[in-house]
Amino acid sequence: MEQKLQELMTIGGLAKEAGVGVETVRFYQRKGLLRIPDRTSGFRKYSELDLRQIRFIKRIQELGFTLKDAESLLEITFCSPKTRPLLEKVCNEKIVEIEKKIADLNGMLVELRQFHQSCGCEASNTLQCSLLECFENDWECCENPNRRKK
Amino acid sequence: MEQKLQELMTIGGLAKEAGVGVETVRFYQRKGLLRIPDRTSGFRKYSELDLRQIRFIKRIQELGFTLKDAESLLEITFCSPKTRPLLEKVCNEKIVEIEKKIADLNGMLVELRQFHQSCGCEASNTLQCSLLECFENDWECCENPNRRKK
DNA sequence: CTTTACTCTGTACTTTGGTACGGAGTTATA
DNA sequence: TATAACTCCGTACCAAAGTACAGAGTAAAG
């Protein structure tokens, strides 16, 4: 553990490395997502750990989670036997959540592809159909020349 | 087209039918997402079309679009050959976006499941490892006793 | 005919995830 | 040493998508 050799970053350096704004770093600190840093003559000093943590947060965010989620994931700092029950719970919740999200997105994808094929792209050369109607008629309005199913 | 027979709804009725709040209807009107309704003695009167339109908006929203997207989709009232290129573009962008999101989430799921098995559950009786490290080390930190791969 | 339920307008407030700004102090470069 | 570039703090602001409220008018039921 050679943390003495580690040169500390200023907030601007950290922000640049992490690809976020300086204000964002301070915002994360206010939100409790970053530990309160040491200071040298008033200036915040950050270590590699803080950088990794911001990257972790950004990663979590990209996956569609909120900062609150990121916070709870960061709370699972160590998975020792003591923290395991909580950890397992949070993990399970997260897994279920992600599975649901994926299912939802797959549903959307199916619908969008249908729309793209039937209305937006290949079909409907001269045929006019309203998008509103397409939705309501399960996208059968365009492909099917004798529409008006109801 | 028997629009004369159609009995018009009041804003509350519309909102209830559409499953949204009264304020939401007025908000949509302000935003230009609903046409300006006729009035009888000051009260807004809505038709079936307005109801269908709100349902459309809600559906679009569920599919991960914003109100702005909904607006632009509503502008594409007809998918004629003329509007098709734009429509196709919007669709494609959305599809790519969703596909990327799903891929990311699947990655996350794999990671979380791995973590759950190796750290959060069966394994790691006395071993301590941080979630942060697990992420960074492609989850080899826990299963593999001789970790520190780099 | 009164009371309750609804509607009207306009403005203000909410949450999430940041951005921007003003006026001061500090550090690094020329 | 001067000057640019950075940092400090607190506050205010932004967009999205609503939600809430005050004070007024209207409509429908008993």
Image (cartoon, coloured by chain):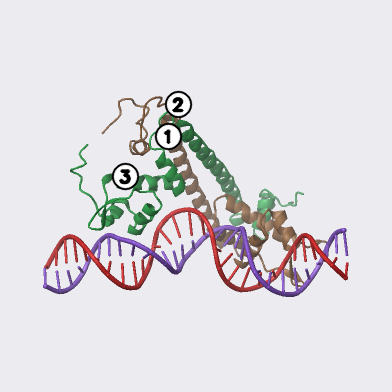
Chain colours: A brown, B green, C purple, D red
Q: Which mark is residue A136?
A: none
Q: Which of A55 and B18 is in front in this view?
A: B18
Residues indicated by labels 3 and 2 sit on the same polypeptide chain: no
Q: Residues within 10 Å of mark 3 (few under 14, many from 20)?
A: some
Image mark 1: chain: A
Q: Quadrant of the C terminus of chain A?
A: top left
**Residue at mark 2:** A122
Residues indicated by labels 3 and 1 sit on the same polypeptide chain: no
Q: Which of marks 1 and 2 is nearer the N terminus?
A: 1
Q: What residue type is labelled 1?
A: Phe
Please give the name of the residue rendered at 45% of the width and 37% of the height, measured from the top-left corner: A112
**Residue at mark 1:** A115
**Residue at mark 3:** B52
Percent of width and height locating residue B40: 22, 55
Q: Which of B75 and C10 is in front in this view?
A: C10
* Relative vertical location of residue B29 with respect to residue B101 in this rendering, above or below: below
